[in-house]
Image: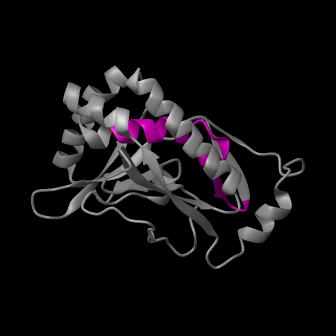
Amino acid sequence: MGYRYIDMTTYKRKSHFEYFKELANPYVGVTVNVDITALLKKIKAENLPFFLTVCYCISRAANQIPEFRQRIVDGRIIEYDDCPTSHTLALEDGTYCYCTLSSSCPFNEYIQYAAQEQEKAKEAKSFEESEEEALDKIFVSTLPWISYTALVNPTPIPADSNPRITWGKYFLQDGKVLLPVSVLCHHALADGLHISRFYELLDRQISAIVK
């Protein structure tokens, strides 16, 4: 996976970076109800897997934001060219494993590829992931049993800098199907502006899939 180091001498958020990276809880996050009315119709009409369809849209949107592809390494910032998602996958024994997916391919190719990768992950039953292996990942997960208004994600000590994106159970409101989507980012790398941009791009990505 290609990446580059950010030049900290010209980095415009250097003072913000230095401040937030020292906090005990350096994360910033919000939950937004995303309109998936048209997307759900497409999913049902074409019998598409709901999780993978949403995962693709979220991954494509997140990868368009440089700050979501940035990580803190030894006090410096690296920016990846593209970041795969890593999600939990339920196993028959009630536990789960990790599955890594790239969204660099077109949507019609992604669904088949992703389904195959999930089967491989189930067979491997891998739960262990080194810090280096996890560094470029965007962590995604779902809480499909409830519609929530806020979500608290577990985070490690010391803090990592991987974005965490989670969605819950969709619900009907005022004739629209809404999906609660939560974003958690390291505040040394991303602000509310970047997070709001993600939601704008997610809406666009959903529209592009529906067309």
Residue 70 can be seen, yes or no = no
Residue 80 spot, x, y in % from top left: 61, 40
Q: Quadrant of the N terminus?
A: top right
Q: Quadrant of the C terminus?
A: top left
Report the front residue among 110 and 210. Answer: 210
Residue stretch in magenta: 53-75
Q: How is the image coloured?
A: one colour
Q: Please identify the dominant SS of the magenta region.
A: helix
Left or right: 2 in relation to 134: right
> In the image, is 68 to the left or to the right of 8?
left
Q: Nearer the viewer, residue 7 or 153?
A: 153
Residue 193 x/y as whole percent: 70, 51
Residue 80 in the image: above or below residue 205: below
Image vertical order of residue 113 relative to residue 6, above or below: above
Labels in figure, total:
0
Q: Residue furthest left?
A: 92
Residue 100 forms part of the magenta stretch: no
Is 28 situated left or right of 143 in this image?
A: right
Q: Residue at x 23, y 59 (%)?
A: 96
Q: Residue furthest front?
A: 174
Reply yes or no: does residue 58 show up in magenta: yes
The picture quadrant where one finds residue 113 is: top left
Q: Considering depth in this image, is 45 or 72 the residue closer to the camera?
A: 45
Q: Is residue 48 left or right of residue 190?
A: left
Spot occupied by residue 103 in the image (x, y as percentages of width and height): 43, 32
Q: Is residue 37 visible?
A: yes
**Residue visible at 79% across and 66% down in the picture:** 18
Seen in the picture, residue 202 relative to 105 is either above or below; the reply is: below
Most foreground residue, 101 or 3: 101
Residue ID at (36%, 55%): 141
Rendered location of residue 156, percent (x, y): 50, 72
Residue under the point 27% across and 40% down: 50
